[in-house]
Image (spheres, grey):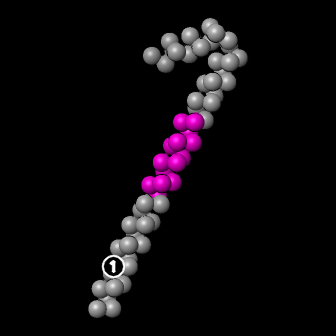
Amino acid sequence: MIANTFVHFKRITDAATQACAWITIISAMAIEIVRTVKMKAAFSADLGEEGIHLLISFDE
């Protein structure tokens, strides 16, 4: 009975650890996406209207 309780507790803590790892990975990816978008926006603002068209055609 006590052994089963510890096994279930270990499974729950392992699942929670894995969920935290996935949350960390996803948030790191989201931060990189936001950083890239901000960088492109700043770069296109420096180039003006032609820069926006240049970036759009460059991405395609």
- Residue sticking out furthest to the bottom: 1
- Judged from the image, the secondary structure of the residue bearing numbered disc 1 is helix
Q: Residue at x 52, y 48 (%)?
A: 27
Position of residue 32 relative to residue 19, above or below, is above
Assess whether residue 24 is covered by the magenta stretch.
Answer: yes
Q: Residue at x 62, y 8 (%)?
A: 50
Quadrant placement of the C terminus? top left
Query: In the rendering, at what x and y percent does residue 22 appear?
Result: 44, 55
Q: For the residue marked with disc 1, what is the amino acid? A: His
Position of residue 15 relative to residue 41, above or below, is below
Query: In the rendering, at what x and y percent does residue 4 appear?
Result: 29, 85
Please state the total of marks drawn on the protein image.
Answer: 1
Q: Quadrant of residue 7?
A: bottom left
- Residue sticking out furthest to the top: 50
Q: Residue at x 57, y 42 (%)?
A: 31
Q: Quadrant of residue 13?
A: bottom left
Query: In the rendering, at what x and y percent does residue 40 appear?
Result: 61, 24
Instruction: Say which residue label 1 marks.
Output: 8
Q: Residue at x 68, y 13 (%)?
A: 47
Magenta span = 21-34
